[in-house]
Amino acid sequence: MRALRRFTVRAALPAALAPLGELVMNLRWSWHPESMDLFAAVDPELWAEVSYDPVRLLGAVSTARTADLAGDRRFLRRLSDARDDLEDYLTGPRWYQHLDGAPRAVAYFSPEFGITEVLPQYSGGLGILAGDHLKAASDLGVPIIGVGLLYRRGYFKQSLSPDGWQQERYPPLDPQGLPLTLLREVDGEGAPVRIQVGLPGERILGAQVWKAQVGRVALLLLDSDIEDNAPAEREVNDRLYGGGTEHRLHQEMLLGIGGVRAVRAYCRLTGADTPEVFHTNEGHAGYLGIERIRELTEGAGLSFREALEVVRAGTIFTTHTPVPAGIDRFPVDLIESAFGGDNGCAGVPLPEILALGAEPDGDPAVFNMAVMCLRLAQRANGVSRLHGAVSRTMFAGLWPGFDVDEVPITSITNGVHAPTWVAREVFELAAREIGPTIVEEAAGWDGIAKVSDESIWETRAQLRSQLVDEVRRRVHDSWLQRGASAAELGWVSSIFDPAVCTIGFARRVPSYKRLTLMLRDPDRLRSLLLDPDRPIQLIIAGKAHPADDGGKELVQQIVRFADDPEVRHRIAFLPDYDIGMARYLYGGCDVWLNNPLRPLEACGTSGMKSALNGGLNLSIRDGWWDEMFDGANGWAIPSSGVEDPERRDDLEANALYDILENQVRARFYAVDGDLLPRRWIEMVRHTLQSLGPQVLASRMVRDYVVQLYLPAARSARRLSADDYAGARTLAGWKAQVVTAWPGVRVVHVESEGVTTAPEVGQTLTVRAIVELGGLNPDDVDVQVAHGRVDDTDELRAPSVVGLKPVGSIDGQYRFEGEVTLEQKGSFGYTVRIAPRNALLATGAELGLLALPTQAAVYTEL
């Protein structure tokens, strides 16, 4: 019989063991080995049976065992020490507490969070990055409040059919069985907090709020599966990235609008500081800006434009998308239905909302979430240097006339949370031979020079051996699930070899990541796997989106190749890639493979995790690898640049095979008289020294704080002070500038000071006569843009020098300044005008630029 209702009953612990419950409910244990050791001591066999889930452990441990532990003085001392350690971690000042003028709090919104496999609310890199962001923020003392959705079925569990086709199942999740607490009124004892979001047709989408405690950081997860909702609304966040277009819109309204309301409720109930900065991780939470505008128009009496300035000042948008096709785009009529009519708000007119998401020169029937986020955020960034450049090109239409390099989208390269992803054996080696602060201080990584070759190689071999054991276990379980009998799986016990060079490839399976590039020449791959003297072995994992049959076909191609009895001892596809599997892969693989189509990998942090464990990267120069590859910390697969996709893939696959055959294997198997591959070990050492300080999430979060959070907080304070006087002034000034801008033009340009044979170091004096359409000289920045020019006289990455006003006559203004010739070769310049105001983050913010027209006169004196 099927149960009518399902819920989880938690253990009632003896009073002496109450601190154990506190430790379990703070997810710091997921990156704190000492806490994990304590949980294991509760019941070692049961700990393994519950897959290292402390909540399940407490639900399954016997009453007799808890009674024994309550009287075990040694265990109680360990428990007391662990609780004291957590208390010190939660309350002591850290890096952030020593900053001046830092935001009181930051709200961080993301559609998914990968904290631990015990809380399956993630699908891939976006969620893992969000989880690492919260963990690193906790370690640094950054007062972040995370905001997401609780998906009652999470992301899917992946398995394989007998013929290798991906299958999905969505086991239901009971929040009571997860490390979550329900946000309640009245000191946590009252009724559950209820958040409401209006939907078309006078419908109400209600949600309760679960809290996960991630170290010092609270993560709020909104849950629509409540009895107050109609059946359709209860299913809004049934699964991650599930449902059709309208379903997705309702998820994003709940995340953005409901998320702001959840933050307000949490701060009201707990006394937590109200966030000054709002950070949206991708565009799914973009409606948080609409909600904050509504708050200000209704609560502070601001106009839409005034409220928009306040919201923009304190909002940060991080884009992870390198292609327009990856952006959420909704039909305009669906947005009209969601935000207009009986669900409209007088302070946030529907035409203003539609204008925020309108694509420049795009389809007027489309509402673009990323475009809206860029218009709602004064500061935006990509997630690697290359991705920042790609993003500036992709969204340049929002800032017409400006050079691509001037588009106000910066970049902060992602990082990974070392305490989560670095194998315990590596930490122990570092603590034993270097010191415990290696992941906190960049200088500590130089200490790796002290670690002996023998110790490095022994640790790497130990991790590889653990991975081989895990591969055998998972392959055995997968074949059983596919229909094989235990009697016919004897071969699994000897697959893979702890002494063989092990290569890992694990990631989502969209087409651009090219899962099957390694199969381009099956015979050549087979020869690499089966070489009698220098073989390789390959471990592959990844999930295709449930609606992506093309991705599923790629998975099936890999599985069918790996099923071949001739090679199945050297290659395996492991289904259901998650955080738990990833730890074994990152620790045990000697080489991490990544071969996306450049530049479609925004960052790709999996290779960072491998590098922190001493793995060497073998990758297309895309994402983070493009900026951090130095020629000695791994290998770069050349990008062919060929447009024909078949020819391109052939060339890049051949390059991959060549590197594996002639470089990777040569170094791995070139051992000396002590049976040590010295050159390989030197690459491992250099990888740790060169990449270790760069790829840390602590570095990433510091960058966000210094480069984005602090400036955003300062801007928001300036606009909010004195009853939002700055916002009112800025909104009025912008309206004046926009109205006057058609009358702003460059009338005349003249220069002098350069000889007939210009030389580096000479000074060019430039004068310009401009008309300002009623604006004042203080309202504009008259600039000389100068630098190299191409064959069509286009300036490439120009430098900009401001000119100073020197007088006026008959309504026209004269500006003057100097340019030093600093580069040889083709040189050119032009004069242009941009708006200027101390409250703008950049001169490009308004997207207004006046350039000389054909009617402008140029004179060389």
Image: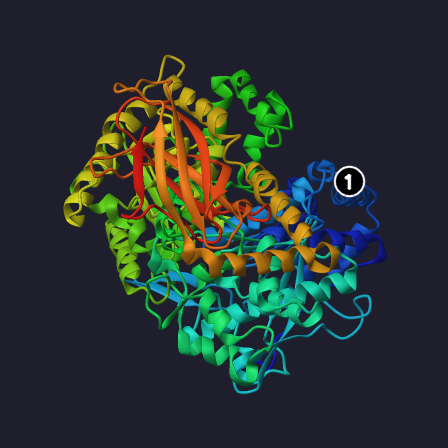
Q: In the shown orientation, is residue 611 left or right of residue 254?
A: left
Q: Residue at x 30, y 42 (%)?
A: 857
- Mark 1 residue element: loop
Q: Residue at x 63, y 65 (%)?
A: 260
| Quarter residue 589 falls in | top left
Q: Is residue 494 visible?
A: no
Q: In the shown orientation, is residue 696 left or right of residue 569?
A: right
598 up-or-down from 441: above or below: below
Q: Residue at x 67, y 53 (%)?
A: 276
784 up-or-down from 223: above or below: above
Viewer-closest of 512 and 749: 749
Q: Amino acid at mark 1?
A: Gly
Viewer-closest of 472 and 324: 324
| Quarter residue 50 falls in | bottom right
Q: In the shown orientation, is residue 796 left or right of residue 267?
A: left
Q: Is residue 431 visible?
A: yes
Q: Position of residue 3 (x, y in %)?
A: 58, 80
Query: Which residue is tagged 1?
Result: 92
